[in-house]
């Protein structure tokens, strides 16, 4: 049962995120709504990266190697998110 709930949550969240990304790229929506969607998507991505980094800091108490790997993964995710946001929103004309 837990697997089904997890799958449904992931599916619904993935669909909503994809709708938000595509809607934020649409020229038919007003600018204020597109900017709001971009801000929500950026905040979500930063929250995910922040959770990975916090997990790495907390894990350093138990295992230094795993903690450092999680922190490095968080830094890599932050870089990937910046590249993704720049690619999708700043290079458009």
Image (spheres, helix red, strand yellow):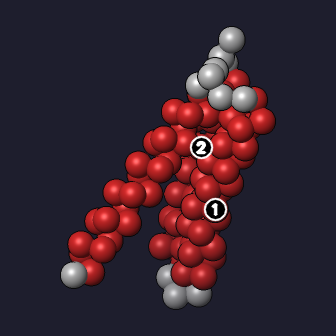
Q: Is mark 1 on a helix, strand or loop?
A: helix
- The label on residue 47 is 1
Q: In screen coordinates, is 34 left or right of 76?
A: right
Q: Position of residue 23 (x, y in %)?
A: 56, 34
Disc 2 target residue: 81
Image label count: 2
Q: Is mark 2 on a helix, strand or loop?
A: helix
Q: Is residue 35 visible?
A: yes
Rate crowding at label 1 as few (under 14), some (14 to 19) or many (20 or more) other CA atoms within 10 Å: few
Identify which residue, 64 or 41, lies in the foreground. 41
Compared to residue 79, the image places residue 7 above or below, namely below
Image quarter hosting the C terminus:
top right
Between the residue at mark 2 and the residue at mark 1, the CA separation in whole angstroms equals 11 Å
Compared to residue 8, the image places residue 54 above or below, namely below
Q: Quadrant of residue 75?
A: bottom right
N-terminal label among 2 and 1: 1
Q: Residue at x 72, y 29 (%)?
A: 30
């Amino acid at each position: 049962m837990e697997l089904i709930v997890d799958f449904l949550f992931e599916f619904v969240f993935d669909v909503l995120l994809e709708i938000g990304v595509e809607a934020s790229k649409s020229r038919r929506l007003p600018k204020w709504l597109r900017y709001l969607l971009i801000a929500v998507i950026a905040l979500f991505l930063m929250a995910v990266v922040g959770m990975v980094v916090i997990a790495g800091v907390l894990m350093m108490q138990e295992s230094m190697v795993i903690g450092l790997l999680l922190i490095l993964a968080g830094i890599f995710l932050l870089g990937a998110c910046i590249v993704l946001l720049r690619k999708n929103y700043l290079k458009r004309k």
